[in-house]
Image (cartoon, rainbow, N blue to C red):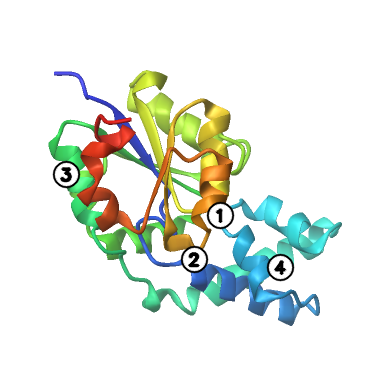
Amino acid sequence: MPPTRVAIFDLDGTLVDTTHLHALAWWRAAEDAGRPRPFATLHRLIGMGGDKLVPAAFGQVDEGAAKALRRSVAEHYRSMRDEVRALPGAAELLRTLKGRGDVVAIATSGRPADVEHALDVLDARDAIDLVVPAKEAERSKPDPDVFSLALERSGCPKQAAVAVGDTVWDVKAAVALGIPALGVLTGGHATQDLVGAGARSVHADPADLLAELDTTVLGGGR
């Protein structure tokens, strides 16, 4: 029996509670580099690929300085990885979709070691069919490449795909690909911002999305 649909999930901030840790890592790296930025400015940019976040936050930066910033971010984040937690209902949501016959895909901007750690914390590998890291995509979010790769590898048609993310960058990537997106508030983006970017519906967290699943496009609703 062919899968009903493919559910393409962002990872950080959507299934694991890491957005604040990533923002703090960028804040500390910016301080270290003598390029301080308000925490809120950096927080709103989390979910973009690092290659896009640097110019968005710091303006024109030469490649050497940009690479140094990204290395510093990686080091700061690694020092906080023990604080990563799964979000409420995340594993149960994935297992419910898998049990319905859907393909469950993860499409993430995270670094490979961080992704592996997050998946360990999530503890739902049995419900995940494929993981597509940003390094395999030509362009990072909000460009749709990583979602497009997940869709291609799922073997499902575009009309069977739904994306779930916590940032406007996830929603914009889905819209650019031409697939519906659902938002969760666990990344700190406001409901109106997610809806304004094109989200079909917005939910408090994965547990809330699971409770309302049958009313959403992911569950067969509208």
Residue 101 location in percent, x, y? Answer: 17, 31
Residue at horizontal 61%, vertical 70%?
73
Disc 2 vs disc 1: Cβ atoms closer than 8 Å? Answer: yes
**Whole-percent x, y for residue 159 in the image:** 38, 20
Q: Nearer the viewer, residue 219 or 59?
A: 219
Residue type for callout 1 = Gly
Q: Secondary structure at mark 1?
A: loop
The image's mark for residue 47 is 1
Q: CA distance from mark 3 to mark 1?
A: 25 Å
Q: Which circle's residue, 4 or 3, is located before the other in the chain?
A: 4
Q: Which quadrant is the C terminus positioned in?
A: top left
Specify the amino acid type for callout 3: Thr
Q: CA distance from mark 2 to mark 1?
A: 8 Å
| Residue contact between numbered discs 4 and 3, judged by CB atoms under 8 Å | no
Precedes in sequence: disc 4 or disc 2: 2
Looking at marks 3 and 2 on the same chain, the residue that comes earlier in the sequence is marked by 2
Residue 117 visible in the picture: yes
Q: Which of the two labelled residues, at mark 1 and mark 4, occupies the earlier sequence position?
A: 1
Q: Amino acid at mark 4?
A: Leu
Figure quadrant of residue 163: top left
Quarter where residue 158 is shown: top left
What residue appears at the point 65 percent right and 75 percent down from the top-left corner?
39
**Which residue is the site of mark 4?**
69
Q: Which mark is residue 19?
A: 2
Q: Is residue 115 left or right of residue 193?
A: left
The residue shown at (53%, 28%) is 177
Other residues around mark 1 within 10 Å, as few (<14) / some (14–19) / many (≥20) = many
- Amino acid type assigned to the residue bearing label 2 in the image: Thr
* Residue that carries the numbered disc 3 in the rendered image: 96
Q: Secondary structure at mark 2?
A: helix
Q: Quadrant of residue 200?
A: top left
Task: Give the mark, 3 or 1, whose residue is nearer the N terminus.
Answer: 1
